[in-house]
Image (cartoon, rainbow, N blue to C red):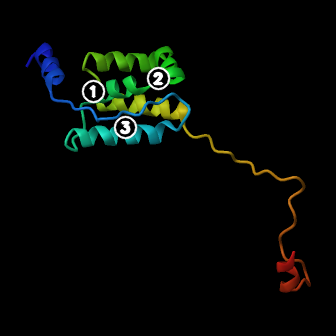
Amino acid sequence: MSAITLASAVMTAPFNHPQSVPLFDGSGDFKSWSRRLIRDYRRANGKEDPHPSSMIQALDNAIVGDAATFVGSNPLLSQIVEQADAFTATAEDLALFQCTLQDYYGVKSEASAAHDGPIPHVAQGDGESLDAYYAR
């Protein structure tokens, strides 16, 4: 099968879209959004994984606002989208596309706890009764 025929076969393969596609604008967690979107596409396609090129196109179409600007201005992501548009993207390209966006738009955890004073000494003191220790 020639490259043109193979690309035509991939392009004409049935690919169903879910009824509703949530959009990602960069304000939430990319990983959980993309998981939901991929799950929706699997359900719409008989629990089959869509071709990586089709999935990258679907992800790219659902990315809007600042996130779309990031994809368009990132040389790696732009190249992956171009490969998807040519139906030559691989599963590795899909994983790289997702990982790059996850790294940029992942949930930022807050490591510090707010408190107004020094952290109190929490160990039981020498000679301190359990009642006194638990009453603190």
**Circle 2: element type:** loop
Q: Are marks 2 and 3 in contact (CB under 8 Å)?
A: no
- Residue under the point 62% across and 40% down: 108
100 w.r.t. 88: above or below? below
Residue 14 x %, y %? 16, 29
Comparing 124 with 72, the one in front is: 72
Numbered disc in front, either 1 or 2: 2
Q: In the figure, residue 54 lies in which quadrant? A: top left
**Circle 3: element type:** helix
Q: Residues within 10 Å of mark 1 (few under 14, many from 20)?
A: many
Question: On the rendered structure, is 26 left or right of 20?
Answer: right
Residue 132 x %, y %? 88, 82
- The answer to which of marks 1 and 2 sits earlier in the sequence is 1
Residue lying farthest to the front in this orientation: 19
> What amino acid is found at the position of numbered circle 3 in the picture?
Leu
Q: Residues within 10 Å of mark 2 (few under 14, many from 20)?
A: some
Comparing 42 with 120, the one in front is: 42
Numbered disc in front, either 3 or 1: 3
Residue 40 x %, y %? 32, 40
Q: Which residue, given by chain and number where applicable, does mark 2 sit on?
A: 64
Q: Which residue, given by chain and number where applicable, does mark 3 sit on?
A: 37
**Circle 1: element type:** helix
Quarter of the image with the C terminus is bottom right
Q: Which residue, given by chain and number where applicable, does mark 1 sit on?
A: 54
> What amino acid is found at the position of numbered circle 1 in the picture?
Ser
105 w.r.t. 73: above or below? below
- Residue under the point 51% across and 24% down: 67
> What amino acid is found at the position of numbered circle 2 in the picture?
Val
Q: Residues within 10 Å of mark 3 (few under 14, many from 20)?
A: many
Mark pair 2, 3: CA separation:
14 Å
